[in-house]
Image (cartoon, helix red, strand yellow):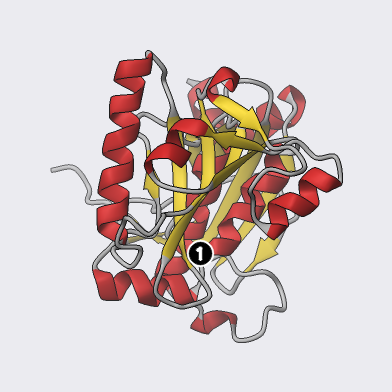
């Protein structure tokens, strides 16, 4: 009879590649002191920043969601940062109805306009604590379907300040006609905006959507995700970016040399080479 695998494995690492398929790549190395043999949970380990106060009390589902949001944000070549609101014709307090109506409308829009719009959207409550709006990313929306905001147009204060400062902000005419005010800004720093979007995932959102039995984010199908390259014992010492009691994470800028060095340092690779 074959020997059973031990219940736990020790000193395990995971090599992941974050790649948007165009030009942005990052290397992520997760190291865990103990893992269950049943499987390595890539995104479930909590990765707290060193020295964070009361880090152990942070809700695990928030950490998981932040990890996933960053993965989907970084691994796809988003073109626009989107903010969308609802006008008074809709029930602004009904998040799931907003989500269902919006996603169905985008699907129909793609069919009727022959577009391939994809999205990653996070709901946020207005200051009134009841009404919802969306922030997130859009790609595949043709520029000719938008109109650039100009001084004198009807817009919010924040958008008006950006337009006055000479920044490019656009209105998605189709969305505005259907739902209400929206704005789109071209993405200039892919990694920075991927980190920024995770700030909308917080305890307030967690408690609000849990009470509504709703989702913390909405995404198109077939978005790119990070690729797990290797799992096992890593013989190379890598300085962590974040470090917790049982788990550490190292983020590295991509280069073929660094990537291949780490990939080749997993002990199972060396065993294969010796056969």
Viewer can see residue 238: no
- Residue 39 percent location from the top left of the image: 32, 51
**Can residue 131 be seen at all in this image of the molecule?**
yes
Task: Judge from the rendering whether residue 188 lies leftward or rightward of residue 262; answer left or right.
Answer: right
Q: Nearer the viewer, residue 39 or 80?
A: 80
Q: Residue furthest left?
A: 1
- Residue 29's place in the image compared with 128, above or below, is above
Out of 177 and 138, give the one closest to the viewer.
177
Residue 81: image quadrant is top right
Q: Please, is residue 74 above or below residue 11 in the view?
A: above
Crowd tier of the residue under label 1, counting other residues whose Cα lies within 10 Å: few below 14, some 14–19, many 20 or above: many
Q: Which residue is under mark 1? A: 201
Q: Position of residue 13 (x, y in %)?
A: 54, 49
SS at mark 1? Answer: loop
What's the residue at 64%, 48% (across, down)?
Answer: 154
- Between residues 124 and 262, which one lies in front from this camera angle? 124
The reply, left or right, for residue 166 in relation to residue 234 is right
Residue lying at 68% horizontally and 23% vertically, measured from the top left: 23
Q: Where is residue 182? Give x, y as percent.
A: 54, 45
Q: Position of residue 26 (x, y in %)?
A: 66, 37
Whether residue 16 is situated above or below residue 250 in the rendered picture:
above
Q: Is the N terminus in the top left, top right, bottom left or bottom right quadrant?
A: top left
Question: Is 181 left or right of 100, judged from the image as shown?
Answer: right
Q: Residue at 41% of width from left, 17% of height from top?
A: 115
Foreground residue among 27 and 119:
119
Q: Quadrant for residue 61, please give it.
A: bottom left
């Amino acid at each position: 009879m074959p020997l059973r695998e031990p219940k736990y494995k020790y000193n395990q690492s995971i090599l992941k590649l974050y790649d948007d398929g165009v030009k942005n790549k990052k290397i992520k190395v997760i190291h865990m002191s103990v893992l269950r043999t049943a499987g390595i949970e890539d995104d479930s380990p909590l990765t707290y920043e060193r020295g964070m106060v009361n880090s152990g009390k942070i809700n695990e589902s928030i950490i998981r969601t932040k990890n996933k949001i960053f993965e989907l944000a970084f691994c796809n070549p988003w073109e626009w940062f989107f903010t969308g609101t609802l006008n008074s014709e809709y029930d602004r307090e009904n998040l799931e109805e907003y989500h269902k109506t919006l996603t169905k409308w985008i699907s129909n829009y793609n069919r009727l306009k022959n577009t391939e719009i994809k999205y990653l959207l996070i709901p946020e409550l207005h200051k009134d604590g009841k009404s919802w709006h969306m922030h997130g990313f859009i790609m595949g929306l043709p520029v000719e379907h938008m109109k650039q905001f100009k001084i004198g147009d009807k817009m919010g204060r924040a958008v008006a300040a950006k337009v006055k400062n000479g920044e490019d902000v656009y209105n998605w005419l189709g969305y505005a006609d259907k739902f209400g005010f929206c704005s789109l800004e071209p993405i200039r720093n892919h990694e920075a905006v991927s980190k920024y979007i995770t700030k909308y995932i917080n305890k307030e959102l967690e408690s609000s959507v849990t009470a509504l039995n709703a989702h913390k984010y909405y995404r198109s199908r077939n978005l790119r995700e990070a690729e797990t390259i290797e799992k096992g014992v890593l013989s190379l010492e890598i300085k962590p970016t974040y470090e917790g009691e049982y788990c550490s994470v190292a983020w590295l800028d991509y280069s073929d040399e660094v990537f291949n060095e780490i990939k080749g340092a997993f002990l199972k690779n060396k065993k294969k080479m010796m056969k």
